Image: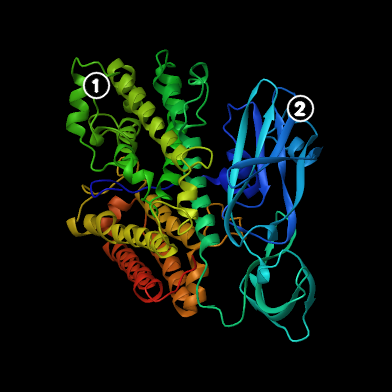
Amino acid sequence: MTASQPFTISTWKWLLGLSVFFLALLVSVPSFAAIKVYLGNPKSGGTASGITAISGWAYSTEGVAVTVKMRLNGETREEIPCCGPRPDVQAHPAHPNAPLETGYGLLFNYANLPAGVHTIGVEVSANGEDPVVVDHAVTVVVPADSEFLSAVDLDAASASIERDKIVVSGIEVTDKASGMTATVDIDLNYQTGLQSFQISSAQEPGDPTASFDASQILADVAAAIFDTYDALHMASECPDPSQRQASVDTLCAAVYSLVGTSAASEADAIALLPAVQHAWRDARVPWEQSEAFLFGPVDTDEHDPFLDTWPLNVTDLEAIIASSADIATVELADDVQGFHALEYLLFQDMNGNTDPAAIVNALHTDERRRAYARRVVEEFVSHTQALRDSWDPEGGNYVHELALAGRGSTDYTDQRSAMQTLVESMVGIAAELAGAKIGDPLAAGSNEEEESRYSNNSRIDFLNNVRSINNVYEGRFDQTDSTSMGVTDFVADQDSALDAEVRMAIRDAMAAIIAIPEPFGQSITDYPDAVQKAVDAATHLETTLQRIIDEVIAAASFAH
């Protein structure tokens, strides 16, 4: 967020139950496409070696037969056999009309390719429908640069376990074509999509082994970032116009249910208001959990100021409502829209009265106030959609811009710059917590500078900001996911003691924030010591994260 912008969070409990597979199903192809396709193997941003499957599933929502072809480095090639039974796809609620026969697969010898980064993908077509292409960037590993190994001798080899991989050193391999032998060291990682261990790196002894390959970390963090923005848009999106006053499942639907052109009676609206306010808090959660990665399109396309500028300019907001300007077309500055404009309209009336009857009365007696709420929520959703799409692998694809650092990325010419960007962003939100978000209101001795004060949501915002740091550090948005890699895997590899300190600093910051009595605005004066402990914990987290840049990233050698 910019210097003038706010800080956020909520509890989106229903999302925490979703599996990584379900998220993959949701983002495989735009919902409007008649062809649905998912490429499960190889994994985007991952590694591939040996003879393994190129596989996934595909079908047409129109019920016509699909043809699947392999793609290699942007070129469509041979047809892949399709379609075998995939009862898991047919049974999934996201695919109610999927046929049973959707699975495709082809065995492919990756050793026929030069070691390094390639794009592997599929093109799926069907009569009367536009073809759909899915390409994944993959690092191909070829032990001893051999297309086919005729023998592997482990007599002199040794093995060890390093976190999530098995390291086997001193393997003697024989090339089938030449009969020549070579000694290699390999890493083995378990790939859930293949349900087996696969070679993730191979090198001859004496080759530089200190270089750290952060490609999987960057791919997993990029996926977690996309999942966060996807969750933000799902919590906010506007349903079909005919359904906008029929639910409070999203922020847009909730606002329309409350202030639609044929809004309910005031009595019904008063009963509805708590659910509408809850929808605002629900959307706030993924946004606040995104503040540890305010780089890329959220910054360059200026979504942050449109969504979350603070302080809110109440004077100008009320002046627009009171004017004769066409609310549907009037130009809105950053500081009269976004989260806090909606918060102001939904949690109090223009006089600061938080009684539900007063809030509803202010809206129901003023059509321009209702029109303003509709305009703001529609602008809001347009930015959550654009932000999500900018990271979508099937859209703007900034996921791959981060994941492919040093391997074709424009913004990140090497892995060091990408890792430093991640850590700098975590440092930034920790500093903002210690300063503008918690420290400045404490220093002022009042809640005038407190963000989210209309809703009393500040403490939840702070906690979600720390969770945002934790999500990047662990490389996951869904806390039930135990397979993803994050910044912690890099730090632990380079300095295990510092990794333990970072983890403890994250826990301490969360604990200190939780210890602040609610509401935060009152604790500024009633419990300043508790607030100060949170400031101190956030400051410690900031300085500990900064050490990753100063002591680890600066000294590390990165692959690619």
- Which dot marks residue 256? none
Of callouts 1 and 2, the N-terminal one: 2
What residue do we see at 65% from left, 57% from top?
A: 113
Q: Quadrant of residue 259?
A: top left
Number of numbered discs present? 2
What residue do we see at 80% from left, 74% from top?
A: 151
Residue type at mark 2?
Ala
Say which of marks 1 and 2 sits in front: 2
Residue that mark 2 sits on: 65
Q: Secondary structure at mark 1?
A: loop
Q: Position of residue 356 (x, y in %)?
A: 37, 30
Residue 135 position (above or below residue 369): below
- Between the residue at mark 1 and the residue at mark 2, the CA separation in whole angstroms equals 49 Å
Q: Quadrant of residue 92?
A: top right
Residue 369 position (above or below residue 345): above
Residue 140 position (above or below residue 63): below
Residue 357 position (above or below residue 535): above
Q: Label 1: few (<14), some or many (≥20) within 10 Å?
A: few
- Which dot marks residue 330? 1
In screen coordinates, is 378 left or right of 475?
A: left
In screen coordinates, is 432 left or right of 493?
A: left
Q: Nearer the viewer, residue 213 or 456?
A: 213
In screen coordinates, is 223 left or right of 411?
A: right
Q: Nearer the viewer, residue 340 or 40?
A: 40
What residue do we see at 73% from left, 80% from top?
A: 172
